[in-house]
Structures are given as structure tokens and as C-alpha cells.
Image (cartoon, coloured by chain):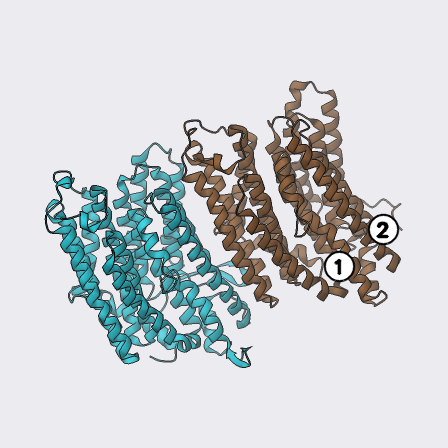
Amino acid sequence: MSFPILSVIVFTPIVAGMLILLIPGERKAEVRVAALAAASLALGLSLWTYFSYDRAAGGYQFVQQLAWIPQLGVSYHVGVDGMSLPLVLLTGVVMFTGVLISWGIEDRPREFFAFLFILATGVFGVFVALDLFMLFFFYEIAVFPMYLLIAIWGWQVTREYAAMKLTLYLFVGSVVAMVGALVMYFASGIHTFDMLALSQAEQGGAFDHLAYNLFGQSVPFQVVWFLPVFFGFAVLGGIFPVHNWSPDGHVAAPTAVSMFHAGVLMKLGAFAALRVGIMLLPEGAKYWAWLILALATVNVVYGAFIAMVQTDFKYVIGFSSVSHMGLVMLGFATLNRQGMTGAGLQMFSHGVMTALFFAVVGMVYDRAHTREIPKLGGFAKAMPLVAVAFIIGGLVSMGMPGFSGFIAEFPIFMGLWQKQPIVALLAAVAIVVTAAYIMRVIGRVFFGGMPAEFEGHISPITALDKVALVILSAILVIIGIYPAIMAPLVESGAVSVLRLLGGG
Amino acid sequence: MIVADFIPSQMLAILPQILLLVLAILILLADAVWKPAQRQWLGWISALGLGAVLIATLFFSRPSTDQPLLFGGMIRHDWLAFFFTVLFLFSASIACMLSIGLGGVSDRGEYYALVIVATLGMSLMASAADLVMLYLAIETTSIPLYVLAGFLKQDDKSTESGLKYFLFGAMTSTVMLYGFTLLYGAAGDTNLYRLADRMLAGAIPVVFIVGAAVLVLVGFSFKVAAVPFHFWTPDVYEGAPTPITAFVSTASKAAGFAVLLRVLLAVFPAVAPYWVSLLAVVAAVTMTLGNLLALSQKNIKRLLAYSSIAHAGYALIGVVALSQFGAGSMVFYLGAYVLTNLAAFAVVVVFARAAGSEEIADYAGMSRRSPGLALAMLVAMLSLAGMPPLAGFVAKFFVFAAAVQSGLVWLAVLGVLNAIIGLYYYLTVLKVVYLYRSEHEDKPIALAPPQALALGICVLGIILVGTVSAPWLTWAVQAAGSLF
């Protein structure tokens, strides 16, 4: 058997977290170094996996399968394809930069990094899971540390409320999806939670003969159960109208957790909705595509407008995530090659971009102690690198050519145009609004005159902060100018999804 | 009747019971002859003795497949009885460890002896195959527990707890006994399995069986604290010495479930549709009411009391599923629940000894005073809430799966909605532990060796059952299999 690299990636954070808990609490420097070492290892391994994935062969690679609870057909089954591999890399990047950004945490850093790493294990686990039970197992591991991270280290004003709201929303979504998954398991009749086997059974027509009699009409199995499964996960993807945990959660969370949260966790929801909802119940997906289109359009447009009117810097970014995640959902709902590919790229691009945004917001807030946009100004002079990083993120956000946002959003719009031109037009409005609010933030926060009270009080950012910003910005630019590094990979993943949908 | 013949295998079947009796007598003797200073070791002897009985049971008292009915049909030595006996011994051992050093109980021989006798009663409950034996076993369990709940005579709450427990217990026990007499009167037999044969043969009118089943269920519902016979739970849990609360909420509840499972599945299959629908409603109401009432609790023991009511509801789902997997999932659920609740009460014991309080608000600053204790609380609360990688997650997953398998999707949906309410109040406790500050943050919490050991065992067990779940599920399903 070859080296189980995916398992090592999945378990590195949690093992590191447990080891960190053994370090005495007052030795904070050692805690930080240990955290950085673990994050570097995870990032290094995910980079290695990313580049050694055989793109010509495609499909699931680095597969490893072990019996877990054989009585129920549960196995520990991991593997990555073109859709999940970029997300594994994304998690590695955000984890690494998140540790760098969190260097200055003084309140119980040991517990902070331990919880953050438990979260990271959950996220890695979901992205590589090829077993339904395993997916839920890791999904919920990713949910609960969030509560503690936000409630303990978050913004004092709203943290308790936001943390509880977020946790309950996500838990509701996951348990509702779990019931759907259990129904699928028993309906398939093949006694396994293995997603590849379930998918095969579905293709073989295992669900076709099942139907429910609702209000005198016969409703096919997939049409009924797609709803709880897809939308249960889509809660974490921030779909309208169950999105409103997300801005509150982003704002209340400490910087590294916001990065994780908006950057990675929302992808977790979207990804699981794709893997379990669309891939295992494709007939349901075809039936309900219109509903996803409609709701996601609201996400995109409404999110952008709400972001426009926010005065809190962090809320602007929070709502921009709602808007951008709407584009991911739109991409899924097109159920065509361009749209799916775009959605996959958008997940990665938005993850890096929003991590960058939240890192910038955190750096500004740590120095200004306010996030009210009217009270800020002139930060470009005091922190030029931060300003540059934010502008790069902004350009990505607007979908400017030459940056990763364009590479991701352009195919989504192409796919949308084929599927439903009106939606494409509506969503395009949002791009304009996005440009407007990004410009407004850049103008008000980074340029103009600096208020007198900040003059001379703005300390420069640390070297570690700089490293984090450079890494995140560089990724956005590299994908923008050299899309071949990721686009074909994602496309191969999208094609295999479409094969299940009966297209190509 | 072959009672007179001495058959070694029969003696091995009741090995745990024999050893428990010996242990109880030893403790009483030691209590009588030892000087006060030596009595501090009574707790260790009881805890380790129970542990030794557990190991002896594991090795020498495994059920054999042939001839499970022993002693003239009084007990049935099967995997269900074996599994639950092990569970009771574990719980009793942990409860004794938690009692060491506790004011008012720690150096009292009769306290430990009563715990051991109650354990003996429980192990007989799990194996009883005859109405007379069953009733005796239930009373052998209950009477020591009534005394234990009221053991702190100087404490009004403890006295109230003991009296309340006794009155409720006596009342429901009478109703149950009435049900037993009806069954005997109708069938002319007291053996559970022969009763079942008569019923299946149609010798007794269905209405009559249903009536008797309902009366019997009253007694069992009291034991497992299911609605509407749950009223005693919060007061008894709050007033009793905390190790006893831990013991009652885990072992005694599990014993109730063992009996419930055996009697319903072995005696009443003839009227299964009736009690299944009745119990489905009871399960739904129990988990919902337990969770809703837990929301507003300020005292940790009362919170855990209502949470334990809710958990009885989840476990009942497994019975209602009426399948071998369902019964197995219930047994698994109880195992996970016993481990988790013991850990939770262990934290309560340790904290109350250090800080003298059981109010949730006083748990503020715990993570700064003792990170290890806070972590144990985190594990216990999240496992109760059903979060991976802990025992509670797999346990909930299995019972919900069993419900879906039997077509009870509505019950599974209700169960997961309840899990959400549960998560809310468990997180509220964790919020106090991790987030809130207190004036006492500079006072560390001392963790005495026995309590540390108990906590360590439980926390490790929770993680182990939650991650390496397959062997435990095999045993749980095997235990349930002896009823099918």
C-alpha cells in the first residue's frame, strides 16, 4: 500500500492539537511554534498532493479504504478528485496563514490553537471523505469548535449571540441532511455508506422505483429527499434565506477564525451539498435546479446590496461572502460544464480572497480599534502592504481579468447564460454593485486623510502578517495569470459530476 | 425442578452476584472491625473490588449458548444479562471512586455496602426470567437506592430526595406488581418465556394483555425516568449525594431499560403493535419535554436530570424500532450514555468539592482554574449533545438509523430536532466554563487521585467508543440478539 498521504493530512492537525494541549499553558511561545510546525506540515503535504495528482488520469486518487463499522457498511474511505483537491490545498493555505495571523493571541493560545486544529481536521476530513458516515462525522467535528472559538476569542459585543446562532444553524442543517442520508442508505438496499457505491447504485436505478404519495400525487424518491440533503448542507454554504448566521458569525469571530470560517467552512457546506446532494441524487438536482437558481440569485444580488450599505468594515466583507457564495450555488445549479467548473474555481478563489480580506480587516481593527468605515481613512500610508493586499482582493472580488476571480466567475456566467439568461443578467448587476462597495471601502479606509486620533499611533504590521498577506495575494494573482494551474483540474472534476447527471 | 443438583456452570452464571455478596459482607465486616482512620480505605476497596468482579465476570461468566434458562427458569444467563451486568459493575465502581474523600459518605461502610447490594439487584434485574425473580430484583435494587439518596441525614435536600424517591418508587412498584398479578392470574405461570408462549397461543384475550402491559410499563417507566413518570428525577438527582446521582442516572436507568427490553420483546410480542405505538409517543414526549425543561435550569444536577430524561427518550427510539438492530442500538446508546454521564457527574463532584457549589453560574472561570477539568467537561457535554468524535454521536446515529430502518422517519426527525435543543443547553454550560470570568480564578481546583482516575477512564472510554465503534456495536447487537 502506498503512503496514506490524505490520512496524514487529515490527522496532522488534530494530533498536533492534542500535543499542544499537553504543553503547559504558560509556555505560549512553544505553543505557537508547535502550531506553526503542524500547519507547515499540513500545507506542505497538501501542496505535494496537489502537484502530484495525476491530471491525465483524473478520477479519485490517493484512495485509501479501511473497514470502520463493517456491520453497517461504514468504512474509512478517502480520496480526492478535481473538485476536492483545490479545497484541500485551500484548507492548508488558510490554516497556515491563520496561524501566522494569530501569533499575537495572548488569552489561552494553547486552547485556541487546539480548537482551531480540531476544526481543521474536520474540514480536511470532509473534503477527502468518500463515505457518507465519515462525511457527517468530520462535518460535525468542524462545527462545534467554531462555537468555542467565536464565543471565547471573538468580538466581545456580539460573540455569544453570534456563536450560538451559527452553531445551531449549522447543526440544524447537518442533522436534517443526516436524516436524508439515512433514508438514502436504507432505500438503496446495498447496505453501505460508501458514496461511490451509492452513486453507482443510483446510476443503476436503485431509487427509481421508489416514490411517495403526497396529496394524491406520486413524487419520486429523489425529488423528496434532495431537498433536506442539499439544503441541509447548503445552510453552511450560506444560501438564502438561511444565510444570516454567516455575516454575524464572520463579524464576531477572531481574525483567524473568520478566515477559516468564510474561507473554508462555507466551502464545506457547498462542497457537501454537491457531493451528497447533487452527486448522489442527480434526478432531484435536475428537478430542483430552478429553486437553487432562484435562491442563489437572491444571495448574489441581495448580498451585494446589503454589503453596499454596511458601515462596519467587517460586515461589508461578511455580506460579500454571502454574495460570492451565491455564485458558487448558481454554478452548481447550471448543471453544465462551464458552470460547474466555475463553481469549483470560485470556491477556491473566494476562499483565498475572503481569507485575505478578513486578515486585512483584522489588521486594521487591531490598530484602529474601530471598524466603522466613516471613522477610518488614510491607512495606505501607514500600512502600504495591507492596502495593496486589499486592493488585490478587491480586484478579485470584482472579477477583474488577470485575477483569479475572473477565471472563476467568467465560466459561471457562461454556464448561466446557457441555462437561464435572465439570471445571468441579474447576477451581473451584482458585479457592478460589488465594484461599488469595494471601491468605497478602498477609498474610505485606505485613502483620504487619516483621522487625527490615529496619526502616529498606527504600528506597522509584523513580518509574519506580511508573509501571510503575500502568500494569499500571490495565489490570487498566480491563478489569474496562469489558470492552467487549476482550471483543467477542476474541469475534470466537473465532468465526472456531469457524467452522473447524464450529460458531459 | 433441578435446583437441588449442583452444576458448576450454573454457579459460574451467577458468579458476579456471588462475588458482589461476598464483597458487601467484607465491606461491612471491615467497617465493623477497623479503626476510624483505616476506614478511609473502604472506598478504594469497594471500587477496586467492583473492578475485580467486573474482570472476573468478563473472563469466567460468559454465557454459553446452550440452556440459557437456569435455576428452574428463574434467571436467564444470556448476552443481554452479561452486557448489562458489566455496565452496572463499571458504573458502581466509578461511583465508589467518586465517593472517596467525600464528606458524610466517604468512610461509611454501609454506604458502600448499599451500593454493592444495589448493583447485585441490578444484575439480577437484567437476568431475571420470572415475574417473582424480577420483582425481587427490582426491590433489591430500589430499596438501597432510596436509602442512599437520603444518606446525608443532616441535609434537608438529601432527606427530601430519599423520601420522594421512596414514595414515587413504592407507588409505581405497586402498580407494576398489580400488572404482574394479572398476568399470573390469566396465564397461571410466572415464567416470562412460558407466559409469552401462552399469549402467542392466544390463550389470553388481547385486551387483557394490553392492560397488563400498560400497568407493567408504569413501573419500568419510573425506573428509566420516562414521561409521565419522571417527576421524581430532578429533585432526587439534586438532593442525593452526587456519586449516587451518577449511579442512579446511569446504572439504575440502564437496569430499567434492560428489564423493559426483555419483558417487552420476550413477553409481549403478541401485542407488539399496541405497545410500539404507545412507546413511540412516550419516547417523543420524553425527549422533547426533558430537553425543553432542561433549557431553564440553573443547577447543574437538575440540568443533568432533565437531560437524562431526554436521553431516556432517545434510547426508547431503539426499542420502538422493534428490530435486532434497534434493540442493539439502544444497548449501544445506553453504554455510551453511561460513560458520558459518569464523566459529567465526576466533574460535578470534583468541582463541588473544590468550590462548594453546584450552580452553573459558579462554573465561570473553570477553564482558567483547571484546564484539564474543563476539557473533561467539554468532552462530556459534547458527547451528551451527540458530537463526534465522541460516543454520543455514534450512539445517536445508530438509534436514528434504527428508526429510519423501521420506517419511523418522523421519530428520527423529532430526535434530531431534539438534539438541537440539547446542543443549545450543553453549549450554554460550556460557555460558562470557558468564557465567563470569576473572582476565584487564581484558586486552582484540586483533583484527587480517585476522581482523576475515574475521569480519565470515562473520558478515554468516550473517545474510544466514539471512534473505534465497531466492536462495541457488535457486542451491543449480540446482547440484543439474545432476545430475538
Picture disc at residue B266: 1
In the displayed structure, does residue A448 sit left or right of residue B199?
left
In the displayed structure, does residue A222 sit left or right of residue A447?
right
Q: Decide which of B86, B322 is in the foreground and name it.
A: B322
Helix, strand or loop at label 1? It is: helix
Query: Which lettered chain is shown in cyan?
Result: A
Residues behind callouts 2 and 1 on a single chain: yes
User: For the point 69% across and 18% down, which residue is it?
Assistant: B35
Which amino acid type is marked by label 1?
Ala
Q: Mark 2 points at which residue?
A: B72
Picture quarter with the C terminus of chain B: bottom right
Which amino acid type is marked by label 2?
Gly
Q: Decide which of A162, A145 is in the foreground and name it.
A: A162
User: For the point 45% across and 77% down, which residue is it?
Assistant: A203
Chain B rendered in what hue? brown
Whether B65 is drawn above or below B96: the answer is below
* C-alpha distance separating marks 2 and 1: 18 Å
User: For the point 44% across and 75% down, which residue is it?
Assistant: A284
| Residue A249 image point, x, y percent | 35, 52
